[in-house]
Image (tube, rainbow, N blue to C red):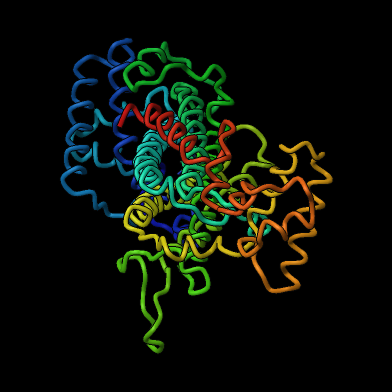
């Protein structure tokens, strides 16, 4: 293997150690960031007179060529080099000769890798935010269409009170709105330019870090060289925000899995997102929803790996930190992919309005409404709750539903019940009356949707 310091024949032990120490197999994808960082560095070296303007121009031209080649064909010879930084410098030497050896002046791979990772995280977080926005648009559209459809709202997975399906979907909109904000915070804190920290202590050369930061689109320069090369908190934050987003997606997936079961029958996923069984012809397995649910564990695993990786590290750089790449890349790929699948799955899901309507019939989910009715007639809530509870118990004993009760029967529990009490057992009415701010009444849901559309820029 070609390292930056190798000379002469290698012993088997060296070969083994180098193979195990190498990261090129997985950090090759940092190449565009590495080259961009090197171009900015080379320009700065030229501008400050650390190398000549001609040397700087040759280096920049060579690096630009490497970038163009990579854009045309991103396959790289992954076994031959220790890491992406080694590879880029070797490639540059092939192209421009000895001058390439000046590029690494006033720089170390320690600040270089920190820079590459920060550039990667900023881009990846931006892409995740786009993915979230896309999924949010889908949620808003479906919620609008389904605002008037009522289903049982659950607590403890027991029927609780009727809610609007649009309201239910919008709950996810707001969850991932906070994820969107979290990824914004990730970008802010990844936005510290580490280059110029050198190996750990800065450099003896008159570098201009502000110039490099400007050229690379960073809004500030990392103020402490030790911190700049040592911490990976921006990666941990990215993966943490990813894990939380995945947990949100996983919960929705779990609901889809339940809702598409025969017992619920609330919804049918597009065939594209289900699979059959090689043995059981009737099966429509919600594989993709299950996969997203499964992958949420994988991203959480990456978060734990990263936290454990840094927890005992003395300052400054330690090789342990090379282990940050795979969890980071894996989380980025997983989250971006899952957002796409999730959006498409919700966009194409078909909801069974008959099953949804049937689910709230005879389920006692309007028992609270009966109690609220009595409260409006002046009964204290605790007493009203007791009356309603006794009615439910009696119905359960007799195998009847609230909808079956006559006014006379209701009045036998409380003389406060009048003709209009019979309306209270309607799930649609129950939901429609929950007009408190943020409540499930379809008119309120439409307000939320309007608010959401505004956040999305009026789309
Ligand atoms: N491949 C290394 C990493 O990902 C680059 C930094 C190497 N620095 C060093 N001093 N060995 O962490």
Please provide percent x and percent y for residue 96.
18, 33
Quarter containing the N terminus? bottom left
Residue 158 visible to an observer of this rendering: no
124 over 50 or under it: above or below: below
Q: Is residue 95 left or right of residue 236?
A: left
Instruction: Pinpoint residue 224: horizontal percent, then vertical percent.
Output: 57, 19
Is 204 or 79 nearer to us in this picture? 79
Q: Residue at x 37, y 31 (%)?
A: 453
Q: Is residue 212 above or below residue 290?
A: above
Work out whether residue 157 or residue 253 is closer to the camera in this orientation and state it.
157
Residue 179 vs residue 336: left or right?
right
For image coordinates 50% across by 65% down, the residue present is 358
Q: Position of residue 55 (x, y in %)?
A: 22, 21
| Image quarter hosting the C terminus | top left
Give percent across and percent down for residue 239. 52, 43
Residue at the image point whose x is 53% and y is 73% from the top: 263
Q: How many marks?
A: 0
Q: Is residue 115 visible?
A: yes
Check the image and report above or below for 264 versus 60: below
Relative horizontal placement of residue 190, taking residue 9 as reference (left or right): right
Q: Nearer the viewer, residue 415 or 200?
A: 415
């Amino acid at each position: 293997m070609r390292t930056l310091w190798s000379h002469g024949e290698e012993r088997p032990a060296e070969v083994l150690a180098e193979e195990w120490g190498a990261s090129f197999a997985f950090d090759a994808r940092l190449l565009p960031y590495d080259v961009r960082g090197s171009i900015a560095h080379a320009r700065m070296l030229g501008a400050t007179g650390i190398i000549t303007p001609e040397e700087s121009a040759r280096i920049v031209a060579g690096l630009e060529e490497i970038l163009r080649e990579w854009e045309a064909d991103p396959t790289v010879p992954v076994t031959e080099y220790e890491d992406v930084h080694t590879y880029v410098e070797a490639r540059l030497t092939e192209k421009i000769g000895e001058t390439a050896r000046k590029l690494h002046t006033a720089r170390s791979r320690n600040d270089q890798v920190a820079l590459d990772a920060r550039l990667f995280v900023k881009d990846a977080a931006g892409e995740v935010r786009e993915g979230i926005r896309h999924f949010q648009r889908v949620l808003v559209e479906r919620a609008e269409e389904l605002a008037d459809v009522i289903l049982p709202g659950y607590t403890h997975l027991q029927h609780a009170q009727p809610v609007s399906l649009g309201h239910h979907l919008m709950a996810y909109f707001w969850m991932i709105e906070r994820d969107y904000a979290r990824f914004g915070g990730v970008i802010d804190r990844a936005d510290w330019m580490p280059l110029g920290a050198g190996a750990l202590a800065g450099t003896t050369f008159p570098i201009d870090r502000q110039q490099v930061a400007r050229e690379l689109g960073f809004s500030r320069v990392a103020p402490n060289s030790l911190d700049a090369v040592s911490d990976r908190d921006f990666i941990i934050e990215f993966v943490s925000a990813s894990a939380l987003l995945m947990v949100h997606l996983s919960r929705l997936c779990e609901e889809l899995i339940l809702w598409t079961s025969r017992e619920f029958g609330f919804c049918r996923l597009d065939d594209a997102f289900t699979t059959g069984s090689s043995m059981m012809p009737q099966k429509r397995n919600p594989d993709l929803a299950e996969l997203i649910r499964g992958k949420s564990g994988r991203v959480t695993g990456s978060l734990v790996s990263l936290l454990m990786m840094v927890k005992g590290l003395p300052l400054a750089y330690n090789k342990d930190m090379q282990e940050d790449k795979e969890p980071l890349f894996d989380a980025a790929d997983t989250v971006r992919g899952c957002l796409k699948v999730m959006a498409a799955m919700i966009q194409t899901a078909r909801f069974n309005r008959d099953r949804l309507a049937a689910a709230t019939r005879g389920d006692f989910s309007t028992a609270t409404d009966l109690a609220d009715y009595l409260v409006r007639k002046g009964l204290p809530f605790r007493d009203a709750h007791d009356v309603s509870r006794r009615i439910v118990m009696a119905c359960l004993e007799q195998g009847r539903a609230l909808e079956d009760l006559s006014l006379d029967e209701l009045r036998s529990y409380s003389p406060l019940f009048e003709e209009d009490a019979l309306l209270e057992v309607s799930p649609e009415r129950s939901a429609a009356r929950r007009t408190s701010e943020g409540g499930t009444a379809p008119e309120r849901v439409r307000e939320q949707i309007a608010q959401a559309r505004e956040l999305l820029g009026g789309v």
